[in-house]
Amino acid sequence: MDLQASFSLLWMLLLLPLAFVLAWYFYRENAWLSTQSKLIQRTLPILRGLGLFLLMLLLLNITLLFNKTEVERPSLITLIDNSSSMMRFRDSGRIVRELENFKKGVQERFSGKYDLLFYSVGSDIQEGGKISLNEDQSNHELGFKHLSEQYLNRNVGAVLFASDGNFNTGDNPSYAAEQLSLTPIITLGVGDTTPKRDQLIGNLFYNDVVFLKDLFPIEVDVEAFKIKNTRANIRLIHNGVTLATKTVDYSAEEQAFKQVQFQVAAEKTGFQAYTVSIDYLDGEYSRTNNSKTCYIEVIDSRNSLCFVTSSPHPDLSALRSAAETNENYLTTFSTPKELVSGNVKPDLVVWHGPNLPADQPAFEFLRSNKIPVLFVIPGNITNASITALDLFNLANQRGQTDEIQSAFNPGFTSFTLDETTRNSLELYPPLVSKFGSLVPKGNYETFLFQKVGKTVKKEPLCYFNKSATLSHGLIFGEGIWRWRLANYMKNKNHEHFNEIFLKIFAYLLVKREGIGLTVKFEKRFSKNDRISVNANFYNASLEAITTPKISLSLRAKDGKKYVHQFRVLNQGYSLDLGILAPGKYHWIATATHENKTYKKEGDFLVEDISLEKSVNAANHGVLKQLSKQSGGNYYPFSAYKKALDSIEKRSDITSIERINTQFWDMVDSWLYLLLIAFCFFTEWFLKRYFGAY
């Protein structure tokens, strides 16, 4: 035990007599005390003096230090590679048994000396070191990262790592292993490092999502070992039909790497499976790595944007140029009459200079079909058009035009713009608008304020109103083409201009969730993922309710059907489907509310990630690197008993003593304060008991 104080402890020599002098002074001429027994005459001053002394000691801020020595035995961590590539060697038939014998040997030899810890690592790390050798991924970095975090500042004597050295997820484990400072890593190499005669399909490069009718590429990496002076055919197969065949020629080299590209037409929507297969050649080590399948989602959901005007205008050309930089947008020009007479309903209309009541049919067409609109209001708009649109009021008119610049609304949060883009808005030329005070109707959000000179007005230059009757945006002025030109003059590109209007188009295209059922379902999972689904149900007031029961019907590719019920979670619904077999699934969610049935449906994919199939040989170089940098040793797995012998001979694996210091502050101790209170309370009680008032 040790003792610390903010002031010298010599002060105690002064405080002790001072406390009892004060106690004596208090009782020196007490007539009542002189009538009491000698015991009371001595006890009361002692209690008073002791209480004062203990109270004065608090001024020294004394802290007691209690040191406790603990002996920590060294830990021996055994980490075993549990990936399926461990089974892809000649001795694979007995590798599981030998790994179990290895674990047993570690326990028998070191259970009395060390704290033994076992882990297995594949796509994840698991305690206990369970050996199944069926993991589809090898993430050795994750294993060593977990150990370095879990056993930071612990007495880890050594790490035993049994693996073939191959990793296909995460980075090289040597970087994470460096965090296990002063810990030797003993590596045991499983498998043969000599490449076998084999060819395999390596990586496939493709887009996860393509559009219907588009041509898209699938790039294929082909690797070959000890296959010389021959050729092989590579086929692209879809729904059992060979779409294309390519040929690769091998020279006399021991190892070859080839790249092949297929051009594929997207002819059907949904998830489409494309299998790349290479012909099997005599003497190949494995057939399973001669093919690989990729899944590509084909969608037909390009948004159509129609630019409407009664006469050509450069503003629409500028806006269309911005839209065409996004390949998801299909753009067309139209007059108001053509918009109504056409059979196609666009997803978004950009209408420059609506002329009502002449264009009233087009306006009613948009409203009845709930097509979002971006209005561009020119300076010559008539009062009749303003009245017929019924979207805003224009007060204080003078029958003339005005030039207005833009100022970004810092409170606008529906979408974000790059800072340089926001700053460029205030430098763009002014728009020409009709003179007057603009007052939008209904609930709206201002994107750009009007700016005249250096004065920013509270009236909007551009605003959005996503009402149920007509979701729209409105730009109060014309001359937008000058913004595009100004952007190019300064930056030699149109990036800022395009960003502004692509964000506006995207925002108006987002449909507001209405009454009924909504389901949040991801489209791609790996076969090891737990699949969960969330849902909500909205009533007529767009409030989330949980009274309807929601069911989910799941149909697998083989036709099997499963029905699940969502459970209520807070103000929504949740469903855990667990882990599903690889393949394509179709789901239908249904709910009934007020005698009406609501339904949502879609597809999702569970992918079989078979990274381990591409392993042709062990990679013991990684294991040797781990051992060398940590001061450990490398051994082939067949010599694991020598590895255990080397651990017994190491002098740096030993117990360590740790001193655990606990602090006891007198000021914070309720026991000490209770002792002070006890002294004063006892004094008071004795005085009252013996009649002192």
Image (cartoon, rainbow, N blue to C red):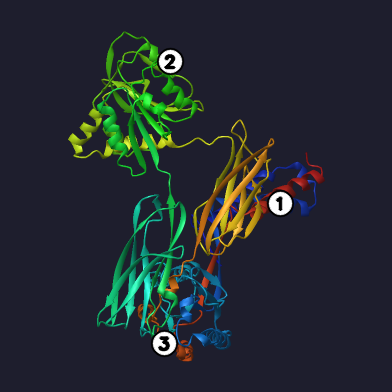
Around disc 2, counting alpha carbons within 10 Å, would you say few (fewer than 14), some (14 to 19), or many (20 or more)? some
Indicate the amino acid at tag 1.
Phe
User: Do the residues under discs 2 and 1 have CB atoms within 8 angstroms?
Assistant: no
Q: CA distance from mark 2 to mark 3?
A: 87 Å
Indicate the amino acid at tag 3.
Tyr
- Residue occupying image coordinates x 63% and y 49%: 52
The spot of residue 433 in percent (x, y) is 30, 18
The spot of residue 168 in percent (x, y) is 41, 70
Between residues 268 and 524, which one lies in front from this camera angle?
A: 268
Q: Is residue 3 in sight in this rendering? A: yes
Q: CA distance from mark 2 to mark 1?
A: 88 Å
**Which mark is nearer the camera, 1 or 3?**
3
Q: Is residue 415 in sight in this rendering? A: no
Q: CA distance from mark 1 to mark 3?
A: 70 Å
The residue wearing badge 3 is: 635
Of marks 2 and 3, which one's residue comes earlier in the chain? 2
User: Do the residues under discs 2 and 3 have CB atoms within 8 angstroms?
Assistant: no
Of marks 1 and 3, which one's residue comes earlier in the chain? 3
In the image, taking residue 514 as reference, residue 646 lies left or right, namely left
**Which mark is nearer the camera, 2 or 1?**
2
The residue wearing badge 2 is: 388
Of marks 2 and 1, which one's residue comes earlier in the chain? 2
Using the rendered view, name the quadrant where residue 13 is placed.
bottom right
**Which mark is nearer the camera, 2 or 3?**
2
Between residues 565 and 331, which one lies in front from this camera angle?
A: 331
Indicate the amino acid at tag 2.
Ala
In the image, taking residue 302 as reference, residue 250 lies left or right, namely left
